[in-house]
């Protein structure tokens, strides 16, 4: 599969400006999975800006949105 950098980059929601992986989804996913995180595109904009991209934060955000609590 070939990377469609221009289309990916246009839709990338990452606000971390010096990131060299913007638009390179395969590299981005690999990096964040190795860090035990999810990429920016998995989070709403207000959460993405905090740079807390942990799996726990992802679960909390979407549990809160659905009204469910642990």
Image: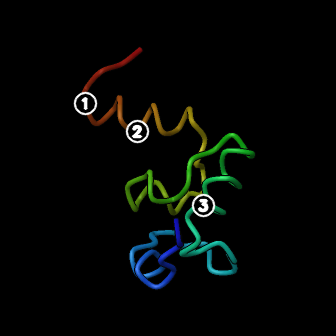
The label number, if any, that marks residue 22 in the structure image: none
Secondary structure at badge 3 equals helix
Give the residue at mark 1.
66
Alpha carbon distance from label 3 to label 1: 29 Å
Instruction: Determine whether label 3 and label 2 are within 8 Å by CB.
Output: no
Residue at 46% across, 85% down:
6
Q: Which sits earlier in the primary sequence, circle 3 or circle 1? A: 3
Name the quarter where the C terminus is drawn. Answer: top left
Q: Position of residue 26 (x, y in %)?
A: 60, 60
Asked whether 23 or 42 is in front, the reply is 23
Q: Residue furthest top?
A: 70
Q: Note whether 39 is above or below 17 in the view shown.
A: above
Asked whether 27 or 57 is in front, the reply is 27
Residue at 66% across, 51% down:
32
Give the residue at mark 3.
26
Q: Residue furthest bottom?
A: 6
Q: Which sits earlier in the primary sequence, circle 2 or circle 1? A: 2
Q: Position of residue 47 (x, y in %)?
A: 46, 54
Alpha carbon distance from label 3 to label 2: 24 Å
Secondary structure at badge 1 equals helix
Alpha carbon distance from label 2 to label 1: 9 Å
Residue at 58% across, 48% down:
53
Q: Which sits earlier in the primary sequence, circle 3 or circle 2? A: 3
Q: Note whether 63 is above or below 13 in the view shown.
A: above
Secondary structure at badge 2 equals helix
Q: Position of residue 22 (x, y in %)?
A: 58, 75
Asked whether 69 or 31 is in front, the reply is 31
Give the residue at mark 2.
61
Residue at 60% across, 41% down:
54
Mark 1 Cα within 10 Å, few/some/many (few <14, many 20+)?
A: few
Q: Residue furthest front?
A: 1
Of badges 3 and 1, the one in the foreground is 3
């Amino acid at each position: 599969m070939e990377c469609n950098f221009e289309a990916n980059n246009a839709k990338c929601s990452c606000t971390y400006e010096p990131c060299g992986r913007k638009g390179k989804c395969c590299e981005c996913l690999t990096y964040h999975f190795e860090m035990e995180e999810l990429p920016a595109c998995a989070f709403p904009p207000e959460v993405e800006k905090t740079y807390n991209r942990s799996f726990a934060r992802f679960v909390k955000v979407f549990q809160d949105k659905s009204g469910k609590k642990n």
